[in-house]
Amino acid sequence: MRKMKKTSSTLLVLSLGLMTVLFPLVPGLHTPLVAQQRAPKERIAEGTVVNKDDTPITGAIVYLKDTKSNSVKSYIADDAGHFRFGELSQSIDYEIWAELNGKRSKTKGISSFDSQSDFHFTLRIDEGK
């Protein structure tokens, strides 16, 4: 009986030692499969800045505000009026808008409760007087 306990203890120690060696070598072995499937996806906000006639506006400045920290990132729309913000947190709400020559589009929002990972916006600036 005593010998059996010693053998069981030895097997347990060897198993733990083997797991300690293998975990760093096999990617994902130490992370449960469920956790891997629920890993946060990268969220992206992209779109186009257009005028009232839906013509793309080059050079408009697009702002993305993190409503938790109030930090703001900006992006200058390219020749096609396109903009893109990547690596957005799933746990933060954002506001996005565009400006050009003192004119501003309506502010759009991204909610932390929205499970989407890709957001596409058309930001319209009325360039008229």
Image: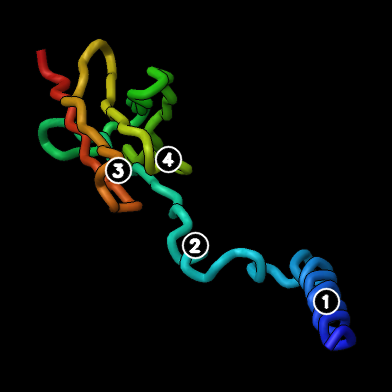
From the image, tell me which residue sits under label 1: 9
Report the amino acid beneath label 2: Ala
Q: Which residue is mark 2?
A: 35
Secondary structure at numbered mark 4? strand
- The secondary structure type at the circle numbered 2 is helix
Disc number for residue 47: 3
Q: Is 113 positioned to the left or the right of 128 in the image?
A: right
The quadrant in which the C terminus is found is top left
Labels 2 and 3: the sequence-earlier one? 2
Spatial distance from mark 2 to mark 4, Cα to Cα? 20 Å
The residues tagged by marks 1 and 4 sit, at their Cα atoms, a distance apart of 49 Å
Mark 1 vs mark 4: in front: 1
Q: Which mark is residue 88?
A: 4
Q: Earlier in the sequence, mark 2 or mark 4?
A: 2
Q: Quadrant of residue 55?
A: top left
Mark 1 vs 4, N-terminal side = 1
Outermost residue on the front side: it is 1
